[in-house]
Amino acid sequence: MTDYRNFPMVPRVIFGRGSFSQIGEIIEHKRTSQTAPFIFLVDDVFQSDDTFISSIPLKNIDKIIFVNVDDEPKTKTVDKYRDDIASEFSELPMGIIGIGGGSVLDYAKAVALMLTNPGSSADYQGWDLIKKPAIYHVGVPTISGTGAEVSRTTVLTGPVRKLGMNSDYTTFDQIILDPVLTQGIDKNQWFFTGMDCYIHNVESLTGTYINAFSQSYGEKSMDLCREVFLEKDEFDEDAQDKLMMASFHGGMSIAYSQVGVAHAMSYGLGFLLGTHHGVGNCIVFDQLGEFYSEGVIEFKQMVVKHGIEIPQGICKGLSDKDFNIMIDVALSLEPLWENALGKNWKEIATREKLRSLYELM
Ligand code: NAD
Ligand code: ZN
């Protein structure tokens, strides 16, 4: 008997500068009704970009919904989008197209799943709880790093936990990788989301779950990250292209391994303080020299090279109760710890150890 995971991959990928202009023809084969819409969930950072918005090929009753991502995706917001769409249209949409960063990509996956699965998205946070296929869903990343474009999860904060809806139906049916869309991102955000990818690679490559599949993707992603963040001085077209592919490969690497300590502890920060994923990972990783010595040294070189300030002191003044909430969230992510530290991880990752690390942040 073997127990290998049989996981889905995105079946269709288009890559290239300007490839977004082909979206109309790409989704056309799914246009089977005049009375059902395509719904475009678009990051509201693009709301005033008339040129870009007019390039979205709306037909019939297709609709754009602008999505605000000041807060990362929540189960109740997913449920609301689903309810609004279901009450506005008499038929199920023909597809959901998410255009934005990891947050909008996750909204698109989640809304596509919740249009066919009853109840609240909070009921499906976990592994393989989704029972019915999603409607057709397409991801168009506009910032690179999370790997959300290839993953089989959509990370949501719910009433009790911050956890993904992990399922074979979550993965996109199509992704459009157009590096032109990643132009003009704020430098800090570019760095934090890019570091999500770098940290995925470190956690995957140094983890106990590592295997040739994950290593082959992780090493390629690592090479690309080093080129973008250590060798190059500007985020030029070449760097945009490479970081987009680094994100893709990094996501593929963790698909068959796992992330580690930085992600576990960053989820704690995210749950209690609302700290966003990219910056949260950087705040944590900065303090993880004892677990990832070489990775942390290289990370600090990247921080200095790009003149980034990692927020400090965010846990100052927190109560014992607050620390315990974060520690509970972090320690509940058992596979991440086991990947990072091995079967006996509980001996190393004690509550006291996590408390002392959080106090440094
Ligand atoms: P994000 O989607 O939260 O966006 C960050 C900021 O960048 C926002 O202000 C957004 O408006 C802005 N932005 C996006 N594209 C832009 C562009 N082209 N120009 C200017 N501004 C732009 O950031 P992210 O780091 O990509 O995603 C983080 C989210 O992804 C978190 O919610 C995290 O949980 C999730 N995530 C999911 C997975 C997964 O596998 N599903 C993996 C990692 C992270
Ligand atoms: Zn991540």
Image (spheres, rainbow, N blue to C red):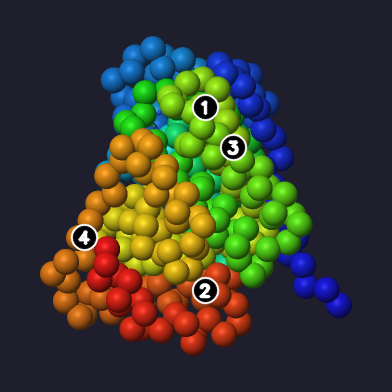
Give residue 205's position: percent from left, percent from top: 62, 58
Give residue 224's position: percent from left, percent from top: 59, 37
| First in residue order: circle 4 vs circle 1 | 1
What residue type is disc 3 on? Answer: Leu
Q: Quick one: label 2, few (<14), some, or many (20+) residues within 10 Å?
A: many
Q: Nearer the viewer, mark 3 or mark 2?
A: 3
Give the distance between the C-alpha atoms of the residues marked 3 and 4, in whole angstroms.
31 Å
On the image, numbered disc 4 is attached to which residue? 314
The residue shown at (33%, 18%) is 49
| First in residue order: circle 4 vs circle 2 | 4
| First in residue order: circle 1 vs circle 2 | 1
The residue shown at (35%, 76%) is 354
Residue 337: mark: 2
What residue type is disc 2 on? Answer: Trp
Seen in the picture, residue 41 relative to 252 is either above or below; the reply is above
What residue type is disc 4 on? Answer: Ile
Give the distance between the C-alpha atoms of the residues marked 3 and 1, in whole angstroms.
9 Å
Q: Is residue 192 left or right of residue 37?
A: left
Whether tag 3 and tag 1 are in contact, CB under 8 A, the answer is: no
Q: Is mark 1 within 8 Å of ligand 1?
A: no
**Callout 1 secondary element:** helix
Give the distance between the C-alpha atoms of the residues marked 3 and 2, in whole angstroms.
26 Å
The residue shown at (64%, 50%) is 218
On the image, numbered disc 1 is attached to which residue? 239
Q: Nearer the viewer, mark 3 or mark 4?
A: 3
Give residue 212's position: percent from left, percent from top: 76, 57
In the image, 244 versus 127, the foreground residue is 244
Q: Is mark 4 within 8 Å of ligand 1?
A: no
On the image, numbered disc 3 is attached to which residue? 224
Whether tag 3 and tag 4 are in contact, CB under 8 A, the answer is: no
